[in-house]
Image (spheres, helix red, strand yellow):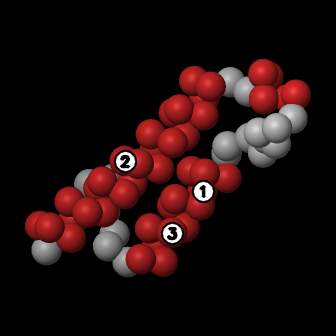
Amino acid sequence: MNGDMSIDPEQIRVEIDAALAQLPSVDPDGADVAGVDIDAVGRQLEEAHQILVDALESVEKG
């Protein structure tokens, strides 16, 4: 993420999709949940969250 955050909704969607695409696909009722790296999932969710925070800050600065 750079300091020139886009406030274009489509660009923000692309960035969020890219961050979330790295999350593992897991069936919550399945046995493979135990093999998920929760720290990696947390990092990806934090990245997506930060994209949204940066976008909101950019809108506020106007």
Q: How many marks?
A: 3
Mark 2 crowd level (few <14, some 14–19, many ≥20, 10 Å Cα): some
For the point 46% across and 72% down, which residue is it?
Answer: 11
- Residue 8 vs 38, above or below: the answer is below
Which x, y percent locates residue 32? 85, 29
Horizontal side, residue 10 vs residue 37: left or right = left
Which x, y percent locates residue 30? 87, 35
- Residue under label 1, please give it: 18
Mark 3 crowd level (few <14, some 14–19, many ≥20, 10 Å Cα): some
Tell me whether circle 3 and circle 2 mark residues in contact (CB < 8 Å).
Answer: no
| Mark earlier in primary sequence (2, 1) | 1
Q: How far apart are marks 2 and 1 (CA)?
A: 13 Å
Where is residue 54, by image quadrant? bottom left
For the point 46% across and 43% down, which residue is it?
Answer: 47
For the point 88% across and 28% down, which residue is it?
Answer: 31
Q: Is mark 1 on a helix, strand or loop?
A: helix
| Mark earlier in primary sequence (3, 1) | 3
Where is residue 8, by image quadrant? bottom left
- Residue under label 2, please give it: 50
> What amino acid type should be assigned to the residue bearing mark 3?
Arg
- Residue under label 3, please give it: 13
